[in-house]
Amino acid sequence: MKPLVQAAEELSATMKLLHRRGWCDGTGGNFSVVVAHDPLRLLMAPSGVDKGSVRPEELIEVNNSAEVTRGVGQASAETLLHLRIIHCCGAGAVLHTHSLAGTLLSRMKLDQGCVTIEGWEMLKGLKGITTHDSSVNVPIIANSQDLQTLSESASLRLRDAPHGLLVSGHGLYAWGDDLDEARRHTEILEFLLELTWRQLLLRNNT
């Protein structure tokens, strides 16, 4: 594991990068990185703050029960979903974005249960995919203010998820073995979701 100071600096920089992309405007988004496994400790941004301006020293630490153990502020209500992804997928970092494409597609395709993406070179940016001649189904689950219910719904879809999952009307959760991989998966999936959305617009206008 990386030293805490380094992990905090890298997470803060990642949040700023995603904020500049327009993927966590306002107080949207929540982001975590594992800094210890036994017992589990997560470094996170506190809830209800502008994620593009959080300094490394303002991050909080959260335990396996979603309780804040260090720092000032509250943990996001969605920490339970982060924890479920970490436990089910062995993730070292989880990044949740609120892009327009992810939010729209997650509602438009909810009845289908997934967004299917196939045939694009950028798919090779996802771990385990080595050819553009591939197809992935990004699962979509219904949103809920009951985070226990939301987490349980997610756990049923995580096994076959391509390192990402959509919550209807809410956006993308992407993860990886570490923060660098989680950021790459976020960027790849957001690119592919944007591509899918624009493709649908073109089809509807021709």
Image (spheres, helix red, strand yellow):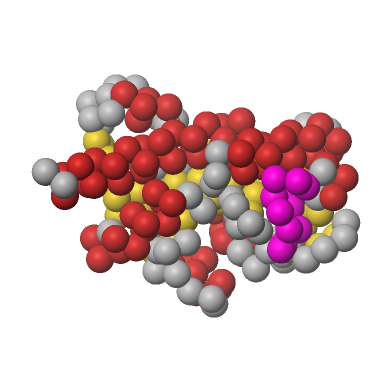
User: Does residue 50 appear in this view?
Assistant: yes
Residue 186, x across and y down, in percent: 50, 39
**Residue drawn at point x = 69 percent, y = 50 percent:** 51
Residue shown at 27% from the left, 24% from the top? 132
Taking the image as shown, residue 46 lies to the left or right of residue 190, namely right
Residue pictured at 61% horizontal, 30% vertical: 180
Q: Nearer the viewer, residue 57 or 27?
A: 27
Residue 11: quadrant of the picture: top right
Find out whether residue 45 is within the magenta segment. yes
Indicate whether 201 appears above or below 83. above
Q: Is residue 37 visible?
A: no
> Residue 117's spot in the image, x, y percent?
27, 40
The stretch drawn in magenta includes residue 129? no
The kind of secondary structure the magenta stretch mainly shows is loop
The residue lying toward the viewer, choosing from 34 and 142, is 142
Identify the image quadrant of the N terminus.
Answer: top right
59 over 109 or under it: above or below = above
Q: Position of residue 141 (x, y in %)?
A: 39, 64
Q: Is residue 103 left or right of residue 206?
A: right
Q: Quadrant of the C terminus?
A: top left
The answer to whether 127 appears left or right of 200 in the picture is: right
Q: Position of residue 97 (x, y in %)?
A: 54, 50
Boundaries of the magenta span: 42-54
Q: Is residue 145 above or below residue 167?
A: below
